[in-house]
């Protein structure tokens, strides 16, 4: 039986994997979060993988607070960069395939078209730099890896833009959201499904791949559709990045091209609006008007 270690399993992606794991009875999962396995500890990672005999490790553990990472550079690097190094070294020793999750924020956003896997990363933020360093450790230390870059992840779980918008729509009558940052939302459940499909294929086409939902939109478009589908009564204004100052700089265009992923694994990827509807339905906040 294929044995899979999931790190950071209480986060958005980890919880989504836990949710769908029951549909894969032929896969054996070991779910760990910080209290069971701190990926920043080289000794703990080495010991856990040595004892576990895992075929795959899906690393969902990360420091994901983009603005706070500018302040907590050491901590975020110890998780996003050193954590990957620890996992890559332990995977190399135990013949375990590492599936590392990375981010669109490794790019600077200056490209007009969607970013491909071979485009040169140039992160604008410490979060992006720490994730890129993690990618580099994996590439340098291991042959058997998949680096899956994704973007704008949301879900029923944890903290994300969707949940922030739903909360703010209950607190405010008016909101400004940036319209000059473009990318693609990703429903964590879709990404989780793709990762388990990837494992099931037994593919050895190792390397970097991009995965997000289909569609290229701004955060403003995303917010507008969230409010439309959930029936929220709020006035939404498009604003510029300068009007919403943040500690970390974000890319203007971080759309990921998924052509390589779709060709390699012969998959279709859901459109962002459809997946948003599924998520809102699961959260039970789909507008009653839309349900009928
Ligand atoms: N969220 C997004 O929009 C995007 C995320 N990604 C990437 O996708 C992956 C999954 O993200 P997501 O599920 O949203 O992240 P979350 O922040 O929701 O989950 C990360 C999990 O890792 C845990 N964790 C933190 N430090 C450690 C550690 N040292 N050892 C073990 N576990 C730890 C966190 O615990 P605690 O909460 O206690 O810190 C949390 O449970 C990450 O690699 C992220 O960089 C990529 C693009 C977009
Ligand atoms: C809450 C809010 C945000 N914004 C803007 C700020 C930012 O540019 C954008 C998204 O804001 P957030 O802080 O929710 O999301 P952010 O932390 O930027 O999300 C990123 O997280 C990391 C982990 C990733 O890897 C990225 O792919 C991306 O998903 O929306 C507004 O314009 N108005 C608002 O009211």
Image (cartoon, rainbow, N blue to C red):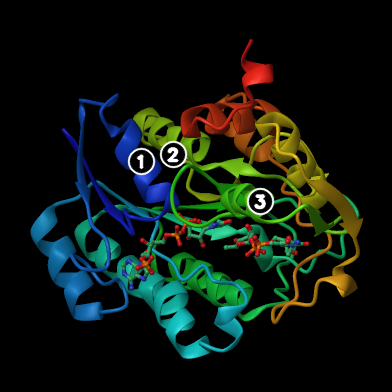
Residue annotated with mark 3: 165
Image x and y of residue 172, in percent: 72, 56
Residue 50 marker: none
- Label 3 CB less than 8 angstroms from ligand 2: yes
Residue 161 in picture, x, y percent from top left? 63, 54
Secondary structure beneath disc 2? helix
Badge 2 vs badge 1, beta-carbon distance below 8 Å: yes
Please provide percent x and percent y for residue 234: 78, 45
Q: Earlier in the sequence, mark 3 or mark 1?
A: 1
Quadrant where the C terminus sits is: top right
Circle 3: element type: helix
Q: Is residue 233 above or below residue 133?
A: above
Q: CA distance from mark 2 to mark 1?
A: 5 Å
Please give the name of the residue rendered at 31% of the width and 53% of the height, measured from the top-left corner.
9
Q: Image point 18% across, 79% down: which residue?
A: 43
Q: Which mark is residue 17?
A: 1
Circles 3 and 2, Cβ within 8 Å, touching? The answer is: no
């Amino acid at each position: 039986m294929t044995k899979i270690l999931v790190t950071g399993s209480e986060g958005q992606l980890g919880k989504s994997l836990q949710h769908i794991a029951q549909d894969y009875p032929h896969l054996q999962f070991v779910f760990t979060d910080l209290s069971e396995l701190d990926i920043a500890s080289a000794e703990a990672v080495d010991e856990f993988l040595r004892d576990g005999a895992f075929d795959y490790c899906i690393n969902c553990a990360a420091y994901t607070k983009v603005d706070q990472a500018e302040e907590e550079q050491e901590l975020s690097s110890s998780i996003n960069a050193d954590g990957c190094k620890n996992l890559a070294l332990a995977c190399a020793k135990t013949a375990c395939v590492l599936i590392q999750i990375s981010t669109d924020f490794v790019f600077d956003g200056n490209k007009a078209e969607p970013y491909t896997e071979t485009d040169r990363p140039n992160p604008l933020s410490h979060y992006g730099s720490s994730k890129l360093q993690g990618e580099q450790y994996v590439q340098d230390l291991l042959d058997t890896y998949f680096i899956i870059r994704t973007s704008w992840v949301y879900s029923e779980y944890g903290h994300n833009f969707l949940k922030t918008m739903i909360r703010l729509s209950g607190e405010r009558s008016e909101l400004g959201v940036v319209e000059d940052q473009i990318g693609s939302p990703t429903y964590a459940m879709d990404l989780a499904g793709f990762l388990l499909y990837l494992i099931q294929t037994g593919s050895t086409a190792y390397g970097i791949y991009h995965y997000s939902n289909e569609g290229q939109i701004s955060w403003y478009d995303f917010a507008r559709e969230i409010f439309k589908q959930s029936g929220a009564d709020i006035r939404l204004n498009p604003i510029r990045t300068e009007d919403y100052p943040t500690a970390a700089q974000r890319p203007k265009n971080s759309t990921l091209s998924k052509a390589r992923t779709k060709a390699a694994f012969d998959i279709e990827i859901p459109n962002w609006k459809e997946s948003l509807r599924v998520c809102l339905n699961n959260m039970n906040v789909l507008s009653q008007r839309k349900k009928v």
